[in-house]
Amino acid sequence: MKKVYSFNSELHRVTGVQKVLMDVHHAICEEYNAKVVGTLAYDKVNTDLNIKKSEYVRLRNPFMFYNSIVILHERKFLMFFWILNHFLFQKIKLVYIHHNIFDNKAWMCPMPEHIVAISNKGIENLTNYFHAPKEHIYKIYNCVIDDVPKDFRKATYHKDKIKILYVANIGMVKRQVELVKRLKGKLDKRIEIHFIGTGTKLNELKALCEDDVNFVVDGYANDVHSRLLHSDYSMLFSSKEGLPITLIEATMSSLPIICNSVGGNTEIAVKGKNAFVTETWDDLIDILNSLPSISDQEYLRMSRNSRDIYEQKFTFEAFKQHYLNLLGNL
């Protein structure tokens, strides 16, 4: 069987990148001799990634990749693999997954012949900024494995306490601290935004939200799917995005979405169909304060539309077939 390595150097973290890496690994492991490669000792790998010891390889010698397929999840290693192939003749079939939108360091990112873009904005970024030929780009949406109970039905949400989940790494890009500063004291007391995640701005966020009626910092959680099922909306208001897993998880859970239009957001969250989409802080405040007046019928319509979008675009089964087709044609 052909060797396929999925490589990421940050397996101590659980972000959308690592989730996609594991989804790709699970999609191909029955057809290929597939391994997950990291730079850490196995005992330092985040246990929530559920990587078995038998399927993990620590990178010690770059020549281990000789004559294999490598699925790369970090652009900072593009030059490394370019050198391996062009100067050390390693015969590596490289597949690079472009997880985000970038506007720097193009000179150190030689693009391979096989690139996966996860959104239309990703394709634009690859062609316009990195000058990647369109024929080298494959569009494959991220996915979420469906774990919603088959008998689950979205109940009418409780307007006396509307729970909104904001699931993301807590830092500058995801803008949780800025959001609280902009919205504090301006929201209906029935609106409760829960921040799920950890990151460099966690302590600052906790201090801002202490004893606030609208904002709750829950920190890191490994039961996000369960929490989504018991929430009313999912929210994201980042400065940039690729194709956020947290919004795909929302569609799987039949949740309406509140977000802006950065990156691939609007390929998941369709304004007027399953989402409220805005670009300004003032409009965001107005949207949040309007939520208690949303009718049960309208809420349930948006909920059903979210689930329909998930089933049409973001299932694991479709994701798996796309990756098997891609690798099969290398």
Image: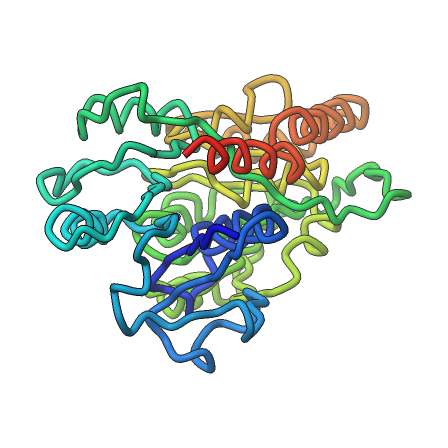
Q: Nearer the viewer, residue 222 or 68?
A: 68
Asked if 54 appears above or below 87 in the picture, the reply is below
245 with respect to 118 (left or right): right
The image quadrant of residue 126 is top left
234 with respect to 2 (left or right): right
Asked if 199 appears above or below 251 in the picture, the reply is below
92 with respect to 108 (left or right): right
Residue at 52% across, 37% down: 323
Whether residue 206 is visible to the viewer of this picture, yes or no, is: yes
Look at the image and tell me in which quarter the C terminus lies.
top left
Q: Nearer the viewer, residue 153 or 131?
A: 131
Residue 258 placement (x, y as % from top left):
54, 34
Asked if 267 appears above or below 103 in the picture, the reply is above
162 with respect to 168 (left or right): right
Asked if 177 appears above or below 162 in the picture, the reply is below
Residue 77 placement (x, y as % from top left):
23, 53
Residue at 84% across, 39% down: 155
View extreme (right): residue: 151
Q: How is the image coloured?
A: rainbow
Q: Nearer the viewer, residue 231 or 182?
A: 231
Residue at 13% across, 38% down: 106
Whether residue 175 is visible to the viewer of this picture, yes or no, is: no
